[in-house]
Amino acid sequence: MKKIFAALPCYNEGLNIGELIDKWNDQKEKLADRGYELTVVGIDDCSTDDTKQIILEKRGKYGNVELLAHEVNKGLCGGLNSAIGYFLQNGTDGDLLVLMDGDNTHDPVYIHEMVEKLLSEGKDCVIASRYCENSDITGVARHREFMSDMAKVYYSAVLRVPDVKDYTCGYRLYTYPIIEKLVSRYGSEPIVEKSFACMMELLYKLYLVGASFGEVGFLLRYDKKQGESKMRVVKTMRKSLVTAVSLRIGNKKSKERS
């Protein structure tokens, strides 16, 4: 049986991570029906609350939950790199990696539509997108939603990745070969951007190694999140704008050298 690894980077998500792991295991049998064995990987980024203990408790309950515990805080980019490393070490061709936020704003139920699109259309990466006709958002302040919409327009103009509208959502599905290509080109820790712009960096670098993309609509549930947001919106937006230009310029220079 092929495997699907659900990697959940989290920092101080003790109020959210347990319910999210439960939701993933609610999908276990349905995933098995289509030939995938589920492993949930909680990536604890040196949390100061009970996040790590809750992941361990869920491991005891389900048996298909693994813990990756950072000894120092590495930020989201460190969580992405850990997920990528774990996937390449424990997976093989035919296996899939799904990454999502560990704050319970993303529902695992959409994984089935994502897998179907990836397999039926031969995609390398499928994004749960906020910008499909059937997408919706609940619990997000209007100013943040407006900033996200403006960012979408900007990224589309600067990065121009085919078939992508949502450059920053962390809920994505990846194939094993495309992650291999990413690491082959950029090294064992391919993501270097420290801010939340690392999600855009990951997407664009996948595009540069030849990834094809698809999107499915989903409901983003910020009303499900407990605890304060860790994103500093203005700082993140500023970094994202700079990072997008830097990535595009870097790609242009690389083409000129070759």
Image (spheres, rainbow, N blue to C red):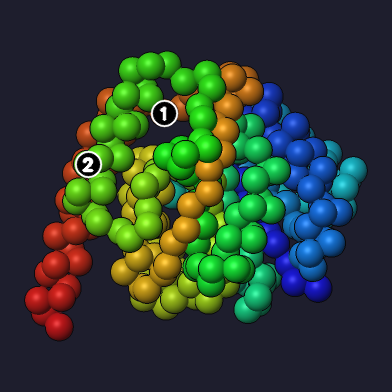
Residue to which mark 2 is pinned: 154
Extreme residue in the bottom direction: 258
Left or right of 130? Residue 244 is left
The label on residue 106 is none
Extreme residue in the front direction: 133
Asked whether residue 190 is in view, the answer is yes
Which residue is pictured at 73% across the width and 52% down the height? Answer: 40
The image quarter in which residue 103 lies: top right
Left or right of 239? Residue 129 is right
Asked which secondary structure carries label 2, the reply is: helix
Asked which secondary structure carries label 1, the reply is: loop
Residue to which mark 1 is pinned: 231
Q: Are marks 2 and 1 in contact (CB under 8 Å)?
A: no
Left or right of 207? Residue 124 is right
Which quarter shows the C terminus? bottom left
Label 1 Cα neighbours within 10 Å, binned few <14 / some 14-19 / many ≥20:
few
Left or right of 144? Residue 230 is right
Which residue is pictured at 42% across the width and 16% down the height? Answer: 141
Q: 74 or 147: nearer the eye?
A: 147
Frontmost of labels 2 and 1 is 2
Amino acid type, mark 1? Met
Q: 75 or 95: nearer the eye?
A: 95
- C-alpha span from label 2 to label 1: 20 Å
Which residue is pictured at 47% across the width and 20% down the height? Answer: 140
Label 2 Cα neighbours within 10 Å, binned few <14 / some 14-19 / many ≥20:
some
Extreme residue in the right direction: 61
Amino acid type, mark 2? Tyr
Asked whether residue 47 is in view, the answer is no
The image quarter in which residue 120 lies: bottom right
Percent of width and height locating residue 125: 50, 62
